[in-house]
Image (cartoon, rainbow, N blue to C red):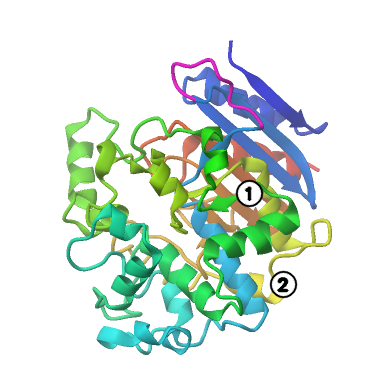
Amino acid sequence: MTNFGGSVESGWEAVESAFRGNFERGEETGAAVAVYHRGRQVVSLWGGVFDAGSDRPYDDSTLQLVFSTTKGIAAIAVGICVGRGQLDYGEKVSTYWPEFAAHGKGEATVAQLLSHQCGLFSVQGEISLAEALDWATITARLADTAPEWPIGSTHGYHALTYGWLAGELVRRVDPAHRSIGQFVSEEIARPLGLEMWIGLPAEHEDRVSPIQGSPLAAQTDDPVLKAMIEQFMGPNTRGGRALSLNGAFSLDGGNAFNRRDVHAAEIPAANGITNAPSLARMYAATIAPIDGVQLLTDEVREIARTTVTPDNEPDSCLIMPTTFGMGFMTHGPFTPYAGPGSYGHPGAGGSVAFAQPERELSFAYVMNQPAGNLANDARAQHLVDAVTSIIDAR
């Protein structure tokens, strides 16, 4: 019998039915979902087990690594700096980070950096995992990297590098020069009472539910589909290089993200460790004040959630079209969320968190059993569809 827990307000029971349905179809090991509507938590559910083959429950004490869902946290951190006048989306990156100007990048804007248009989806040459986990090393390598396409001419998913690039901007402009992990802790998590870390303290390690297998494994027997995955995500492709940082994260069977050293480092594109209620509450506070805390000004939020990548432009790393605002993936075919106006970020294997001001909605789903996708996970979409149906029927 599957372990379930949590709470659902009256009228939101369809979300619980959809959540349980994911387990009944055998699609989950452990997972959680949370929904805020009009500034209140209306759903917080969890279920399953902490680790496959164990009887430890996946519950409200469980923490989860959420891969690229972390990018939304980093985008909010940048947006906080913009709201304080410390950063300007239209200004040159090199204004704040002079070393970034190397190799012809001097005119690149913050907006181009945040919308994956700078051609810095990996470094040039070899890099070890230890080097990637050292902040000073990886940011210096990126500043000294030549763009792989003319800046602004196209966009391509900076799967890992986005976080170091955005995080270094935050560190450079913050008056205390805090790392982005410390910034998130002090400016986002603490004011809102969240459990959320980029760089997990050791005392919380035993609460982190391990990812069950590689999130990007070709989980198919179809030789045609396997060939497509290899063509677009192979080790020498742009997609493969972006997702593994030239192979640095390909250790441990492709699942380096269960390692303690990876959890302890600051990888603001991919190693956020948190839970669904914290993510949903964070996004709710980008729409309106939550207990007096509003993370983004209305003006910054409207800029940040506006798509700036061209309609239907193929992603130079992921091949299919993707849509970006200021660090957020915006509503589009790759990231449907709850429809137009939504902004947030999905994570490899299925996790996702976003907001949609039009419905006064924020949503988060996390899990330990990855599906073979980068976005638009069917399990999450079942839950989102249940949520939007409830709101639209009111």
Where residue 88 appears, as percent x and y from the top left, is: 56, 84
Q: Residue at x 77, y 43 (%)?
A: 41
- For residue 104, side relative to residue 82 (left or right): left
Q: Amino acid type of disc 1?
A: Leu
Q: Is residue 93 above or below residue 137?
A: below
Residue 319 visible from this viewpoint: no
- The residue sitting at 70% across, 50% down in the picture is 281
Q: Taking 313 as reference, is 358 left or right?
A: right
Say which mark, if any, is on residue 271: none
Is 1 above or below relative to 169? above
Viewer-proximal residue among 158 and 14? 158
Q: Is residue 282 magenta?
A: no
Please give the name of the residue rendered at 42% of the width and 40% of the height, measured from the top-left corner.
Answer: 349
Q: Magenta region's main secondary structure? A: loop
Q: Which residue is mark 2?
A: 298
Rendered-image quadrant of the N terminus = top right
Q: Position of residue 247 (x, y in %)?
A: 22, 52
Residue indicated by mark 1: 279
194 or 226, which lies in front? 194
Residue 228 in view, yes or no: yes
Task: Give the alpha-carbon distance from disc 2 to disc 1, as whole Å.
Answer: 19 Å
Tell me the magenta residue range. Answer: 51-60
Quadrant occupied by the C terminus: top right
| Image location of residue 343, percent across then percent down | 58, 59
Magenta highlight on residue 59: yes
User: Disc 2 residue type?
Assistant: Asp
Q: Residue 171: x percent and y percent?
A: 52, 73
Q: Residues within 10 Å of mark 1 (few under 14, many from 20)?
A: many
